[in-house]
Image (cartoon, rainbow, N blue to C red):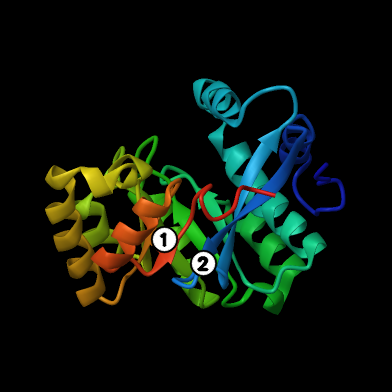
Amino acid sequence: MICFDHLKLSEDILTALRELNIDYVFQPIFEKDKKTVYAWEALMRPQKVTVTDLIAKYQGEDKLHVVEVATFFGAMQAYFLRGYKEKVAINSFPSDCMRPEEAEVFWEYYGEDIRGRMIIEILEYPYFSLDHWLEKNRSVRNMNNLFSLDDYGSGINNMEKVDFIKPDIVKIDRSLVSFVDQAPDRQEQLKKNIALFQERGIRVVAEGIEREEEFDYMLSLGADLFQGYYLARPV
């Protein structure tokens, strides 16, 4: 179980964090050889409820900020406890970011250990906040970390967001990857999108790979990185 009591955060946020009762599992993102781990994606696992229900509850109570803070501190705590050396991918709401005093605690606590090791995955919901994005972009780039646009083709994450955010990585949503080898209507558009991303120096992750045929086809389209149950489940 993740513990937040040692952090020099405000008492109100610490109280809210203690109520979460969360842990983390990690799912690898692989290079083309199916063996080399490029990064580990941190996935929240609350106690007694699903992560979907927890987020819906906190969104309804206008408390997604608590989940945002918990994700950064909790995921990094679990990552270092496991002793991973590869990059770590952390989900982040496009509508929120840590407050300056929280970000200061985060950087002070982890320091140079996180420079160049983090991938901030911008989620596809609930909405995009320009003010929060500008602050998040500044702090992430200052530490030489990367941005990933999660679930491209789902929710608010589309080509317009790619043009604006200029991510280092784009993750193709599993709805576009699933049975792609049998879906001519998706194949040509995916081929064009992947080529466009790579012209801009953006690496492409095919996520939700559950079949060998999906892996092979996304590889043939030029995808750089791969994630899904076919390769490895979260651990």
How far across and down, in percent of the image, does residue 185 sit?
12, 43
**Is 34 located above or below residue 231 in the figure?**
below
How far across and down, in percent of the image, does residue 97 sit?
51, 50
**Nearest to the observer: residue 143 or residue 162:** 162
**Is 110 located above or below residue 201 in the figure?**
above
Q: Residues within 10 Å of mark 2 (few under 14, many from 20)?
A: some
- According to the picture, the residue beneath numbered tag 2 turns out to be 34
How many numbered marks appear? 2
Residue ID at (69%, 61%): 106
**Nearest to the observer: residue 61 or residue 188:** 188
Q: Do the CB atoms of the residues marked 1 and 2 lie less than 8 Å apart?
A: no
Residue type indicated by callout 1: Ser
The earlier-in-sequence mark between 1 and 2 is 2
- Which of the two discs, 1 and 2, sits closer to the camera? 2
**Is 173 located above or below residue 105 in the figure?**
above
Q: Is residue 131 left or right of residue 46?
A: left
How far across and down, in percent of the image, does residue 6 sit?
87, 52
Residue type indicated by callout 2: Lys
Q: Residues within 10 Å of mark 1 (few under 14, many from 20)?
A: many
**Is 32 located above or below residue 149 in the figure?**
below
Residue 148 is labelled as 1
Residue ID at (31%, 42%): 179
Q: Locate the N terminus by quadrant.
A: top right
Q: Is residue 162 left or right of residue 226?
A: left
**Nearest to the observer: residue 94 or residue 100:** 94
Residue ID at (19%, 53%): 160
Q: Is residue 227 left or right of residue 48?
A: left
